[in-house]
Amino acid sequence: MLQTVGGVEMALPAWKEHGKSVETENGYVDKQDARGNRAAVFWDMDPRPGPISSDEARVALGNAEEIGAQQIAGHPARIFRTMRGSAAVWRCDKTARILRVISQGSIDASDLAAHVRCHAVAATGNGEVPTAASTVLGAGWTFGNRSKGSISWMRDDAVLTYFAGSTLPGPRDADAARVAAPAWVAAAGLSDAVLTGAASTIGPQGHPAVLVHGAGTLQGRAVRWSLIFWRCLQRQKTFAAIVFSQTAPEDSALLSARCHG
Ligand SMILES: [Zn+2]
Ligand SMILES: [Zn+2]
């Protein structure tokens, strides 16, 4: 049955709908039948550039074994065997989203994924980007720009970018944050990311967080950056924010993000 939900076109079996969220930034359709077959498509804002990496796919799917690759709607996808079936995962650069197709039972995820059109509808917004608490952010910051999955603020040569929340799990410790950091540094428009440190900290609104420091370049000029990952328990979403400047960026600017309430 061909349907378009949250700007994603799909053809899932005519099984009972076990859940659906029509949001373009974090949505899903989950169908199951009485015999334990399941077919589901999930999508989340993901402004990281380039095809999905093996590490990113593994984080998105949890306990799974990579078994192949496939082009889906023009994107390189990774195919996994899961505990109870199979899964396909890829990034759509046209809508800045990560897509997951999960299957259990009679149909392979790769067959289901072959019918998914992730950018059938071009329009996606910024996603669920945190707002800025101006009292924490301090004076002098002005609105920079908004794009799919992010909003930026600027002060002098410093740029602060909040990324949209995602239902995917984020890095929980310094080691995981080091692995995840370069893709988010690239999402902020920086090249040549070099990490200088990572540590657990208290993030925006008191959430447990991991802070990563490093260097990179912006259009050939050297900059330093601070990147923070946190999980908002109230919204059940993972967030990331980065600030960079030519001198040492102020980590405190990262704490101005308001993810809930
Ligand atoms: Zn696409
Ligand atoms: Zn929160």
Image (cartoon, rainbow, N blue to C red):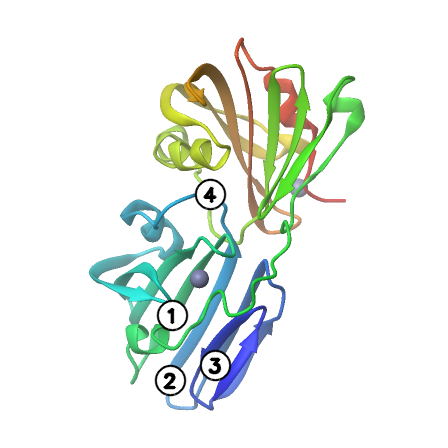
Q: Label 1 belongs to which residue?
A: 102
Q: Amino acid at mark 3?
A: Lys
**Residue 84 visible somewhere in the drawing:** no
Q: CA distance from mark 2 to mark 1?
A: 13 Å
Sequence order check: which comes first, mark 4 or mark 2? 2
Q: Which mark is residue 31?
A: 3
Q: CA distance from mark 4 to mark 2?
A: 30 Å
* Badge 3 density bin: few <14, some 14–19, many ≥20, Cα 10 Å: some
Verify CB contact (< 8 Å) between mark 3 and mark 1: no
Q: In the image, which is nearer the foreground, mark 4 or mark 2?
A: 4
Q: What residue is rendered at 80% in x and 23% in y?
A: 135
Q: Is residue 55 above or below residue 206?
A: below
Residue in the image at 37% along x and 35% along y: 176
Viewer-nearest residue: 64 or 22: 22
First of labels 2, 1 by sequence position: 2
Residue underneath mark 2: 36
Residue type for callout 1? Ile
For the residues marked 3 and 1, what is the alpha-carbon distance in whole angstroms? 10 Å
Residue 170 disc label: 4
Q: Position of residue 103 (x, y in %)?
A: 35, 75
Q: Position of residue 218 (x, y in %)?
A: 46, 22
Q: CA distance from mark 4 to mark 3?
A: 26 Å
Local packing at callout 1 (Cα closer than 10 Å; few below 14, some 14-19, many 20+) is many
